[in-house]
Image (cartoon, rainbow, N blue to C red):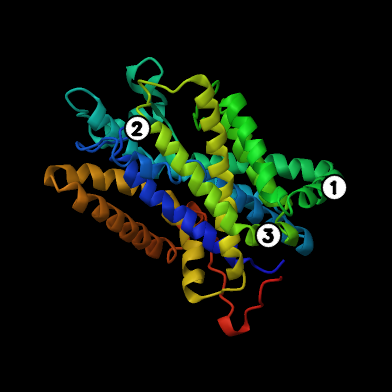
Amino acid sequence: MSRRHDIDWVRICAFGLLVFYHVGMYYVSWDWHVKSPYAGTALEPLMLLTSPWRMSLLFVVSGVATAFLLGKARRDGGRFLGPRSWRLLLPLLFGMFVVVPPQVYLELAEKVPGGYHAGYAAFMATYLRAGDIYCTAPGDCVDSPTWNHLWFLAYLWAYTVVLWLVSKLAPKPVEAVGAWLGRRLSGAGVLVWPVLWLALARLALVGRFGSTHDLVDDWYNHAQYFPMFLLGYLLAFADGFWESLQRRRWTALAAALAGYLTLIGVWYFSGYGDDNPPPDAMRMLLRVTWAIEQWCAIAAAFGFAYRFRNADSRALRYLTPAVFPVYILHQSVIVVLAHASKPLDLPVLLEGPLLVALTFAACFGGYEIVRRIPPLRPLFGLKWKATPATPLADARPAAG
């Protein structure tokens, strides 16, 4: 039950990638809340480097964290679901009604022909009434209230509730499944079986169910994210699984890079695209390739990080609690900064890195404020009072 510092580092890096990714969304041709006047396709191949695996990785990490939290609650005789729901749902609700609305307001300012001229108070009155605020086409609406980037919290809470119920009703079968999975996902199986599942899910569902992040009708995403969450939970303490990932980290990295190069080579550099889709057989092959990159990138990340499982540090102890507040704030900060920077007409090569740097600065500045004010801490996923840190010299090393 000792803390896995490698998982902390992976979590920190994965959430940090979200800042780069969402700044990138401002500059690509894909739909987003606000768009740069210079938006185009140039950055899209780089965005595809993390698109297949970024969120799946976070769900594996969350599954591991859930295993530690539930194990601690059982060991100490404490409650699990109530405190966990409080730490996920309170920030979600606060985010939907305080943090996210500026994103919606500025999206309206950019999408409504002639501009959206209502003041923020009038906008919030409309936002709180709920429903479609503005539609560019049927099914393409700016609606309210919305969770935007905070959809991850809603999914994580739903998956946690399902897992908690199953583990309460059938603890022995859950343990048996974990043991069986641990045997299968050791050796070469650690790379093969997850890829097969993700490939089947993508082949069967992605053409029928788009990514909605609406929870109730997002079947392809559930087919990839919930198993990743379960995998993290069931194998959190399976040493053979983590050691197999470490032994095969270079193989996994090579497979992930090969998958990525295949995706961008076919989609961006072979004349295919949304207006000229590839033949069906090639599309099916690309879906399998997507699954290979998806899992092998995750496997490589965990494999390389595993050697740092005992690597506690002051930087890690600062960044670990900062991740949640920074995640909650980052997209609204990006949208506000991007919209405000338009009149400056900065060169893209200056504006992009500046947006990244200012976003991190503003989010960590926000964290510094939040962590010092007890009533604000729970709104950003932190305990009311900070837990006193164990001196590094006295910290117990992680098991394994």
- Secondary structure at numbered mark 1: helix
Which residue reaches farthest top?
138
Provide the residue designation for mark 3: 242
Q: Secondary structure at mark 3?
A: helix
Question: Residue 291: x and y, percent?
Answer: 57, 38
For this orientation, the residue located farthest to the left is 344
Q: Position of residue 187 (x, y in %)?
A: 73, 54
Residue type, mark 1 in image: Ala
Depicted 229 relative to depicted 304: above or below: above
Along the line of sight, the residue nearer the viewer: 230 or 291 = 291
- The type of residue carrying mark 3 is Trp
Residue found 13% across the figure and 44% down from its top: 345
- Sequence-wise, the earlier of marks 2 and 1 is 2
Q: Residues within 10 Å of mark 3 (few under 14, many from 20)?
A: many
Quadrant of the drawing holding the N terminus: bottom right
User: Which label is found at residue 30?
Assistant: 2
In the image: residue 183, left or right of residue 201: right
Q: Residue furthest front?
A: 270
Sequence order check, earlier mark of 3 and 1: 1
Q: Viewed as shown, does residue 113 lie left or right of 64?
A: left
Residue behind mark 1: 176
Q: Please provide percent x and percent y for residue 218.
A: 56, 28
> How far apart are labels 3 and 1 at the CA level?
19 Å
Q: Pick whichever, 372 or 139, lies toward us.
A: 139
- The number of numbered badges drawn on the structure is 3
Evaluate if marks 3 and 2 touch, with contact meaning CB atoms under 8 Å apart.
no
